[in-house]
Image (cartoon, rainbow, N blue to C red):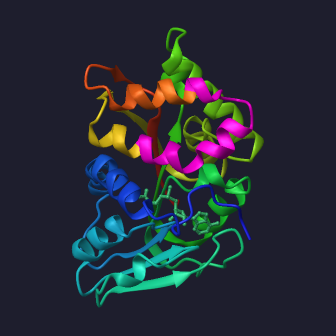
Amino acid sequence: MTDYMFPHSWPQERKRLGFMSAMLDPYTLFRMEQLGLTSGWRCLELGAGNGSMSQELCRRVGSSGHVTAIDLDTAFLSEISKPNLEVRTQNVVEADFEQGAYDLIYTRALLHHLPQWQEVLEKMHAALKPGGALLIQEPDIHPAEALEAGDWRDFWIGFRNWSATIGVDHQLGRKVAAHLKGLGLAEVQSHAETINFDGGSGPAQFFSLSMAQIRDKLVGSGHVSPELFERFMKLLDDPNHWGMCISFVTASARKA
Ligand SMILES: C[S@@+](CC[C@H](N)C(=O)[O-])C[C@H]1O[C@@H](n2cnc3c(N)ncnc32)[C@H](O)[C@@H]1O
């Protein structure tokens, strides 16, 4: 069993995922539309979380299409009632996917949690129909790495370094496209979306809930001091503070 960092059993996880959906869904959908998402498609979503994108996919593919949504914990997904949605409770590292079955396979903010991400990508590739599309959206902390020294940057670098010690790669976004090309996929493209946000905004609340959930482990690791943690949380609340931290990088490709 994996030690996933943000279990759904945390009382505020539903709220945290809601902020994530509001922040990223429009951008994800834009990339899906560019890949030609249309009625009749068979789609597979890995690590579907609260199912916001699975529901949107169900709507877009219609009654002639089908969506399979996989997650370790399907408590939120199982609340969705859609005739063309199938929910599977599976660990994507261990699960087998149908070979050559899907027009679109999509995942967001999952692979950076998995040291076995390359093996999962290979299984995703094998599960595509010829001509089928992959869309992967993973974080990359390069905006924080590029900032001037100060509490904002120091916090994010401490967070990045602690994440790496538990097998979570906040530099994954920049690596996926090259790997897809190496697997022989065609039409590989990659774009990064960086949000510059103010304290108290939706993205700030997403990060505030995320950090509240992992505070004790992060501070306990020594990578972020308790004082820096408190000052950072105040910045996330401060409407006069604007900051960038993590980019969300899409990599898309088609099976040759
Ligand atoms: C950060 S959340 C992202 C949720 C959703 N993809 C989104 O972007 O809104 C990661 C999701 O992946 C799921 N997950 C983590 N490890 C997994 C694994 N090994 N197999 C399947 N799902 C996993 C978690 O339960 C969680 O729902």
Q: Nearer the viewer, residue 32 or 53?
A: 53
Residue 133: where, in percent of width, then height?
Answer: 44, 61
Q: Nearer the viewer, residue 149 or 102?
A: 149
- Residue drawn 56% across the image and 35% down it: 174
In the rendered image, the vertical position of residue 220 relative to residue 213, given as above or below: above
* Quadrant for the N terminus in the image: bottom right
- Residue drawn 45% across the image and 67% down it: 48
Residue 29 shows in this picture: yes
Residue 224 among those drawn in magenta: yes
Q: Nearer the viewer, residue 245 or 29?
A: 245
Residue 189: where, in percent of width, then height?
Answer: 45, 41
Residue 194 among those drawn in magenta: no
Q: Which residues are magenta?
A: 207-228
Q: In this image, 237 relative to 115: left or right?
A: left
Callout count: 0
In the rendered image, the vertical position of residue 13 relative to residue 87, given as above or below: above
Residue 184 shows in this picture: no
Q: Magenta stretch mostly in which secondary structure?
A: helix
